[in-house]
Image: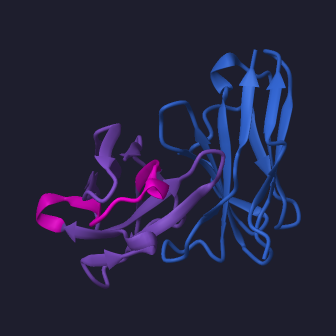
Amino acid sequence: GAGVSQTPSNKVTEKGKYVELRCDPISGHTALYWYRQSLGQGPEFLIYFQGTGAADDSGLPNDRFFAVRPEGSVSTLKIQRTERGDSAVYLCASSSSGSPLNEQFFGPGTRLTVL
Amino acid sequence: AQSVTQLGSHVSVSEGALVLLRCNYSSSVPPYLFWYVQYPNQGLQLLLKYTSAATLVKGINGFEAEFKKSETSFHLTKPSAHMSDAAEYFCAVSERTGTASKLTFGTGTRLQVTL
């Protein structure tokens, strides 16, 4: 079956612009996560959805970052007024539930470059 | 707060040699621990996980890890390295009691396998 997909695979934007990154989770997975991986670092948690609601958004760095999952499936991570420090690979993962016993399946990521 | 520390950002072994990648964790409650592998231009893939059922955990591709509470360690091993094992490896911890099973990752260890 299809895994987690993310689009675009690469996004180059200019400082100050708005970007949207999309995640298509595995069908039927209720839990969805966003992580950010900066160069030379491990992924860092951003936000977790259980169904349509954001159950934990404690990892969002500031109010320029926002994510939605209106129908409990596809999720969009939105970044306003991008800064050069936002350049990173943004990873999405999904799981059959929010339990830590269930594996998180990761997508290939979107590489965001802010010039 | 939970955290993991991976000793050695780069490890090089000869093909056929033992692979040992080190991970130490810090957690205020009994943790769930994971090892993920990331091949170039691919998403993170789960190698194995510890969920308290057994301290020696066997994963895919011949890897295994042993949970040692007294040493707060969860080192990853493989008896004989293959060229195909060259990748980046991440150790991660998930809090058992949290409402969200967000993962906290280490900074990763890049494994190089030489002839």
Q: Give the range drawn in magenta.
A: B69-91
**Of residues A44 and B61, the one drawn nearer to the viewer in this rendering:** B61
Seen in the picture, residue A42 relative to A19 is either above or below; the reply is below
Residue B80 colored in magenta in the image: yes
**Of residues B13 and A37, the one drawn nearer to the viewer in this rendering:** B13
Residue B35 colored in magenta in the image: no
Q: Please indicate, yes or no, whether residue B1 appears anywhere in the rendered image.
A: no
The hue in which chain B appears in the rendered picture of the protein: purple
Q: In this view, does A20 lie to the left or right of A59?
A: right
Seen in the picture, residue A61 relative to B34 is either above or below; the reply is above
Q: In this view, does A112 lie to the left or right of B43?
A: right
Q: Quadrant of residue A81?
A: top right
The hue in which chain A appears in the rendered picture of the protein: blue
Residue depicted at 52% across the width and 58% down the height = B102
Residue depicted at 27% across the width and 66% down the height = B79
Seen in the picture, residue A59 relative to B96 is either above or below; the reply is above
How far across and down, in percent of the image, does residue B97 sit?
A: 41, 69
Furthest residue to the front?
Answer: B115
Colouring chosen for the image of the structure: by chain
How far across and down, in percent of the image, does residue B43 sit?
A: 63, 54
Seen in the picture, residue B13 relative to A99 is either above or below; the reply is above
**Of residues A107 and A33, the one drawn nearer to the viewer in this rendering:** A107
How far across and down, in percent of the image, does residue A101 sit?
A: 49, 77
Residue depicted at 26% across the width and 62% down the height = B74
How far across and down, in percent of the image, does residue B101 sit?
A: 51, 65
Furthest residue to the bottom?
Answer: B53
Q: In this view, does B110 lie to the left or right of A71?
A: left
Q: Please indicate, yes or no, whether residue A4 appears anywhere in the rendered image.
A: yes
Residue depicted at 84% across the width and 32% down the height = A19
